[in-house]
Image: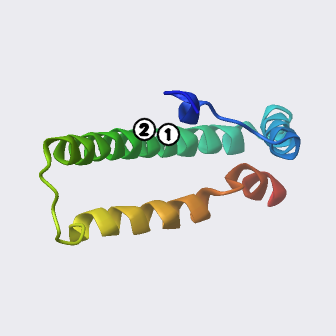
Amino acid sequence: MTWGDWMMVKWTIEEELHIEAQSRSALMHPDDRDVRSLCASLIKQNAYYTRLIQQATGHIAHLETSAFLGEHQTKPPHRSVMDLANRAARYAKLFSNLALRLFRRS
């Protein structure tokens, strides 16, 4: 794997079809209020994940720099890092299939 290949998102055909079905359900939904609510939720979720990726990238860069310079730390990860990882997992579970859940209730 060359540098940067891991950043290329690769979907299975099933995942692509599932995403397309979810996006079409939003486009075809008759209730504008539900669509606006979904849009607002997705904007907040996108901001959260953008910040999470920025922080993770910064942390990874710090770890790689420390390893490169030979400053290996032996203590376990800081509690806030573990809390952040746990919150990210909870939010990912909570927001999975959000679009389908919103549109199925109407």
Observer-nearest of 25 and 64: 64
State the quadrant of the C terminus. Answer: bottom right
* Mark 2 surroundings within 10 Å by alpha-carbon count, few (fewer than 14), some (14 through 19), many (20 or more): few
Quarter occupied by residue 26:
top right
- Mark 1 is surrounded, within 10 Å at the Cα level, by few (under 14), some (14 to 19) or many (20 or more) other residues, namely few
Q: Nearer the viewer, residue 66 or 59?
A: 66
Mark number for residue 50? 2
Circle 1 — which element? Answer: helix
- Residue 41 in the figure: left or right of residue 65: right
* Residue 98 located left or right of residue 30: left
Q: Position of residue 60 (x, y in %)?
A: 31, 45
Q: Which residue is drawn at 38% across and 46% down?
A: 52
Q: Which amino acid does label 1 sit on?
A: Asn
Q: Mark 1 touching mark 2, by CB under 8 A?
A: yes
Q: Residue, x 35% and y 46% (percent of image)?
A: 56
- Which quadrant is the N terminus positioned in? top right
